[in-house]
Image: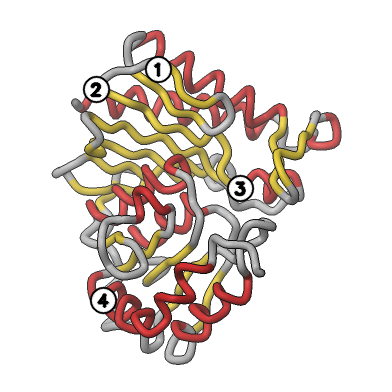
Amino acid sequence: MQPLLHIAIAAARAAGNIIIRYINKVDSLSVDTKRRNDFVSDVDRMAEREIINVIRRAHPRHAILAEESGAHGEDDYRWIIDPLDGTTNFLHGFPHYAVSIALEHKHIPQLGVVYDPFKEELFTAFRGAGATLDSRRIRVSHSQGLSGALLGTGIPYRPDQNLDAYLATLKALLPDTAGARRAGSAALDLAYVACGRLDGFWEFGLKPWDFAAGALLVQEAGGMVGGMSGGQDFVKTGNVLAGNPKAFKEMVRALQPHLADVAKVNQSPA
C-alpha cells in the first residue's frame, strides 16, 4: 500500500505546481459559477486533470470520484479528489487552500494527502500507520475540552442552507472557547485539527472530496471524526464534526440540545 501513498503525494505536488504557477495570473483565468458563490476556475480543471493523469498512469483500472469531473469507472479502489479546496480563497489571493486526495478500498479509507502549495506543507495519513506533516509525526492537541479551545468552522453561504439554524450551533459551541475561525478550506481545517493547530472543527453540507483525506488525517493523529450527534453518519450527510477526543465529546454534548437545529442547516429557511 505504501507505493499508493507515493502516487498520491506525486499527484498532489503536481497539482500544487499548477496552482502556484497561476497564483499571480488569476485575472487571466476563466471562472465559472457552479451555483451562487461557488466557483470553478481553469486552475481547478487543470489541477484535477493532472491528478487523474498521475493516478491513471499507475493504476488505470482504479475508480475516481473528482469534484469537477465526477465519477470515473468502478473498482474496489476509489480515489477521491478535490484539486483545489478553497477556490474562492485562491481567486481572492487569500493564501489558504489545498489539494486533497484520498484512496478508499471497498469503502474503507486507506490513505489521505492534503497539500498546501502556498506554504509547501504536506499532510499525509496511512491507515494504521499514523499521520505526518512534512514527514514528521503529528498528533491532535491536548486540550482538555472546549475551555480555551480554538475551533474551526464553515459558515453556510449557499441558498439551500439555513444560516439561522447554523447560528444556533455556533451559540452552543462558542461560549467557553477561545474563538472560532472560518478560513475557507475544510481539508486544511481538518489537517489543522490533526496537527493540533485547531482543537476541533464542525461544518455542514460537505462533499466526500472535502473531508475524505482530512478525516483520515484526524483519526490517524489520534482524534475523532463523526456527525453532529457523534455517530458515523457524516459520510452520508456531509455534516462533519472533528476534534481531539475530549473536545470532540464536549462538542457532541453541547450540540445534543440543538439536534433539531442541526437537521435544519442543510434546508432553506421556510
C-alpha gap between disc 1 and disc 4: 37 Å
Residue under pointer 2? 76
Q: Amino acid at mark 2?
A: Asp
> Relative to 127, does residue 4 appear above or below in the rendering?
above
Q: Residues within 10 Å of mark 2 (few under 14, many from 20)?
A: few
Residue drawn at (33%, 39%), measured in percent from left and top?
112
C-alpha gap between disc 1 and disc 2: 15 Å
Residue drawn at (65%, 69%), measured in percent from left and top?
269
Residue under pointer 1? 55
Secondary structure found at label 4: helix
Residue 52 placement, left or right of 194: right
Q: Amino acid at mark 3?
A: Gly
The reply to whether discs 1 and 2 touch (Cβ–Cβ < 8 Å) is no
Tell me, for residue 86, which label it has, or none.
3
C-alpha gap between disc 3 and disc 1: 22 Å
Q: Position of residue 246 (x, y in %)?
A: 24, 77
Residue under pointer 4? 249
> Relative to 262, does residue 19 appear above or below in the rendering?
above
